[in-house]
Structure formats: C-alpha cells, structure tokens
Amino acid sequence: QVQLVESGGGLVQAGGSLRLSCAASGRSISSYGMGWFRQAPGKEREFVAYISWSGAITTYTDSVKGRFTISSDNAKNTVYLQMISLKPEDTAVYYCAADPRKVRKFDYWGQGTQVTVSS
C-alpha cells in the first residue's frame, strides 16, 4: 500500500509560480510511473503530467506544455510539479497518483491540494 500526500498549493497571482510536492510513504515509488491530475469546479478530473519510473519519459497535457515540469526524487520518495506562468484557468485541486504497473493505470491517489490563480 502506498500513501500519497500532496502539498505546496495556495493562492497566487496570474504569471506566478508554485511547486507542488507529492510525498509517498509505505513503499518506494522509484519503480512506479507517477502522474499529476487536476479537477476544476464543475469539471471532470483531467490529466496534467506523467513521469515514467526511470524519469526518462515525461508527458504533459497540451495546455501546460512549456509551463509545467514533472520530476521525481527517489531519495525523498517524492514527485514534484513545478508550475510557472500560471493562469486563472489552472485553478483546480491537484492530485498526484501512482502507477505501479507502469501502464498508466493509477492505483493510488492523494487527497489533493488546492491551487488558485487570481487574475
């Protein structure tokens, strides 16, 4: 069993930056694919970014390419989402998720962290 805890959310002005963290416990996530998702009010949860277990492959939804960067630190058992040039439309609850089978099926989810971008 893996427990995931997100942190780093908050209120920021448009154009600002935040770095989200996802700390894992219970098991090492070094062999897991990891993803970030978000859900805005009244909308379905959407994929944001993914990093493969080796870190060699990262993918992003089009709307965040060039602004968001996903990374991992195996020593800290933590995954990050660096967000720059934030826009009001990035406002959402952000969730991290673990993909232990490395097939982009996410078995473990965190509780989420709120990101609010003001215009």
Image (tube, rainbow, N blue to C red):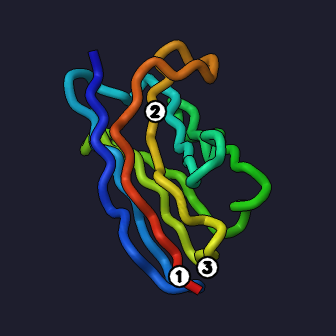
Image quarter of residue 51: top right
Q: Nearer the viewer, residue 52 or 43?
A: 43
Q: 99 above or below 62?
A: above
Image quarter of residue 20: bottom left
Q: What's the residue type where badge 1 is placed?
A: Ser
- Residue where numbered disc 2 is placed: 97
Q: In x, y percent, where is residue 13?
A: 50, 86
Crowding around mark 2 (Cα neighbors within 10 Å: few <14, some 14 to 19, many 20+) is many
Q: Nearer the viewer, residue 6 or 117?
A: 117
- Residue where numbered disc 3 is placed: 85
Q: 96 above or below 118?
A: above
Crowding around mark 1 (Cα neighbors within 10 Å: few <14, some 14 to 19, many 20+) is some
Disc 3 versus disc 2: distance between alpha carbons? 24 Å
- At 36% across and 28% down in the image, what residue appears? 29
Q: Which badge, 3 or 2, is on the more N-terminal residue?
A: 3
Tell me if 36 is positioned left or right of 76 in this view. right
Disc 3 versus disc 1: distance between alpha carbons? 12 Å
- Residue where numbered disc 1 is placed: 118
Q: Nearer the viewer, residue 117 or 8?
A: 117
Labels 1 & 2 near each other (Cβ < 8 A): no
Q: In x, y percent, where is residue 119?
A: 59, 86
Q: In x, y percent, where is residue 69?
A: 57, 59
- At 46% across and 33% down in the image, what residue appears? 97
Looking at the rendered image, the disc whose residue lies closer to the viewer, 1 or 2, is 1
- At 32% across and 48% down in the image, what residue appears? 6
Q: What's the residue type where badge 3 is placed?
A: Ser
